Image: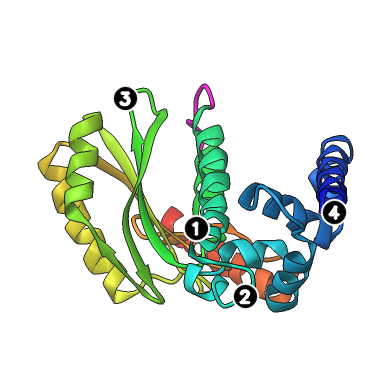
């Protein structure tokens, strides 16, 4: 038993050192999953479990995105271990978001779009976030104010109110995503836009923009136009969208 324990301990150490020296991106799929499982399970051989998870989900991102109830279906995964594994994604997201928000200034449109793209582009459920902007045009705060599924998100107006009160914001951006869908404004989006505008106005907060992120790009409800393309601009779809954008810009310049 002691020999087996020492083998596992040695394997974990070698794996940790390999990730440190070579970089996580240079690990094989099984090594990457094993490494993550070492943080979930302090002891024991996690290699068989890593294989079972990869058999079910195919890659590490899908494993991290899997719902807790689904993870529990895998042999060797209990409720707490499933919860720990799933929560790792939230930790990674928090790091990315806070790292982006700690820029000295975020005043250009491109910087803001980079920020919200990292925030919501790859989320699997629909979320609505508020981005707080101070008088100098700097992003100073961000909060999720609504979550949902498919094509509908429920806005928590209490969260919106508390966010505005806490930071006393002069301006804000609203952004939500359409998971696995296009960034086309829906009837529900238009209704939510009007509702949020009313609340922000009552607190003296200006709505800078209301954005929708889809698989194809970022759409501005306020400006009624596409603001960023995710598709290849040389592809047929990219050319069609670009022509539509150019036409819209031409009409606005008349």
Identify the residue at image location x=51%, y=42%: 94
Looking at marks 4 and 3 on the same chain, the residue that comes earlier in the sequence is marked by: 4
Q: Residue at x 64, y 69 (%)?
A: 76
C-alpha separation, residue under disc 1 versus residue under disc 3: 29 Å
Q: Which residue is mark 3?
A: 135
Dot 1 or dot 4: first in sequence order is 4
Q: Does dot 2 land on a helix, a strand or a loop?
A: loop
Q: Is residue 45 left or right of residue 219?
A: right
Q: Closer to the camera, 221 or 122? A: 122
Q: Nearer the viewer, mark 4 or mark 2?
A: 4
Discs 4/3, front: 4
Lower position in the chain sequence, tag 2 or tag 1: 2
Q: CA distance from mark 2 to mark 3?
A: 51 Å
Q: Which residues are magenta?
A: 103-108
Q: Give how far apart the Cα atoms at labels 4 and 3 are.
A: 61 Å
Q: At which x and y percent is residue 215?
A: 57, 68
Say which element carries label 4: helix
List the residue tagged with mark 2. Answer: 74
Is residue 224 visible in the rendered structure shown here? no
Q: Is residue 89 visible?
A: yes
* Residue hosting label 4: 4
Q: Rounded to the nearest whole Å, what is the CA distance between mark 2 and mark 1?
A: 52 Å
Q: Could you tell me if the residues under marks 2 and 1 are in contact, i.e. CB atoms within 8 Å?
A: no
Image quadrant occupied by the C terminus: bottom left
* Residue furthest front as drawn: 1
> Would you call the spot at circle 4 few (<14 residues within 10 Å), some (14-19), or many (20 or more)?
few
Q: Which residue is mark 1?
A: 249
């Amino acid at each position: 038993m002691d020999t087996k324990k020492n083998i596992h301990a040695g394997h974990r150490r070698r794996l940790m050192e390999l990730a440190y020296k070579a970089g996580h991106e240079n690990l094989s799929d099984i090594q990457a999953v094993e490494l993550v499982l070492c943080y979930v399970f302090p002891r024991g051989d996690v290699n068989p479990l890593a294989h079972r998870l990869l058999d079910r989900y195919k890659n590490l991102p899908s494993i991290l995105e899997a719902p807790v109830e689904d993870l529990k279906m895998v042999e060797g995964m209990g409720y707490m271990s499933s919860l720990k594994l799933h929560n790792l994604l939230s930790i990674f997201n928090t790091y990315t978001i806070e790292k982006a928000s700690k820029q000295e200034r975020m005043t250009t449109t491109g910087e803001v779009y980079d920020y919200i793209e990292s925030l919501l582009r790859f989320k699997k459920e629909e979320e609505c976030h508020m981005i707080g902007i101070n008088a100098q045009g700097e992003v100073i705060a961000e909060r999720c104010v609504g979550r949902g599924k498919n094509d509908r998100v429920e806005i928590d107006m209490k969260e919106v109110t508390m966010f505005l009160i806490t930071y006393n914001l002069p301006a804000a951006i609203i952004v939500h995503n359409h998971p696995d869908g296009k960034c086309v404004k829906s009837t529900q989006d238009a209704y939510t836009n009007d509702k949020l505008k009313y609340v922000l106005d009552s607190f003296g907060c200006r709505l800078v923009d209301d954005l929708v992120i889809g698989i194809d790009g970022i759409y501005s409800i306020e400006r009624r136009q596409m603001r960023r393309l995710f598709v290849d601009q040389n592809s047929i779809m990219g050319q069609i969208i670009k022509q539509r954008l150019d036409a819209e810009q031409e009409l606005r310049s008349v």
